[in-house]
Image: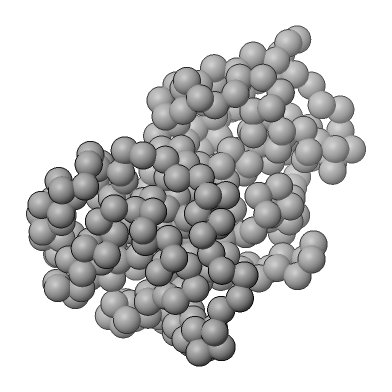
Amino acid sequence: MITIKIPATSANVGPGFDCLGLAVSLYNTVEVEPSDTLKIEIEGEGAHSIPKNGTNLVFKAYRRTMQHLEAPTVNLHMIQHNQIPSTRGLGSSSTAIVAGILIASEISGKAVPLETALCIATEIEGHPDNVAPALYGGFTVSMQKEKQVRTMSFKVPDTLVPVALVPDFELSTAKARNVLPQHVPLRDAVFNTAHASFLAACFAKGEMEHLLFAVEDRLHQPYRANLIPGFDEIVACGREVGIPVYLSGAGPTVMALCKRHNAKQFIEQAKPVLACHGNWKVYELEVENEGACVVGK
């Protein structure tokens, strides 16, 4: 069987709404081989909620890519091993899309360049902030104009330790987008442009000491904060010890960008806050500087 491994991703990274993303060391793995009939097995996260028929997102992305390659779509026997919580702001849908694209390339025997994969994935997902780091790894800066998508990726020093705080409730991207205003004040747009640009420069130069202020946002986090009980308290908890905290993607996962020497300190400091707001899982992660790949055939 062909085995594909795809990292989780954290989109926006504060002010970079729909354009910045970070790959982290939590993975979904898909084993696949051609089959006479479509058979999908799912283990781990989403085992009871992810479709096991032709509407499965991995299969849909595979089928769309085969159409692009002008190759016949054959049925698959597919086993999804999911570590990434679904509908939590960690790019689970993007891992499915990227997996489908890589599967199509392997089954068809036709190469899909990264730039093409990015365009197909963005077409399906609607925005590149998660699919780009899933494909390229590291920290990515993306822009989209109609069907044209461009990404630049940067390796991230291993001194950065992302800590994901994942609550026990789901939050759909659609619901999280519905609370956003259609228009924002010019001063907020300027604020985010400056902060997103400065944040990208921090990652490009590897100067992480400025991230505490660079992750501030006025376009989406203030509106989504009420959807995540305890969010403002967790942010304040991080700021007390100099650790930048932001809403991962549309949420509800909250991400802290710690350093190796203070990650455990932050986790201990956050535990009392988390305990007041339901059940949370804490993942002490690494930045994944490599994107999705084939790990076995």
- Which image quarter holds the N terminus? top right
Q: Position of residue 59 (x, y in %)?
A: 68, 29
Residue farthest along the top direction in this orientation: 36
User: Toward the viewer: 210 or 173?
Assistant: 173
Name which quarter of the figure residue 256 lies in: bottom left
Give the residue at x 86% y 33%: 71
Name which quarter of the figure residue 39 lies in: top right
**143 lies above or below 137:** below
Give the residue at x 71% y 33%: 60
Question: Does residue 271 appear to the left or right of 231 in the view shown?
Answer: left
User: Toward the viewer: 244 or 75?
Assistant: 244
Question: Does residue 126 appear to the left or right of 68 in the view shown?
Answer: left
- Residue 77 visible at all: no
Q: Position of residue 272 (x, y in %)?
A: 10, 52
User: Toward the viewer: 141 or 16?
Assistant: 16
Give the residue at x 61% y 19%: 52
- Residue 252 visible at all: yes
**258 lies above or below 187:** above
Give the residue at x 25% y 56%: 230
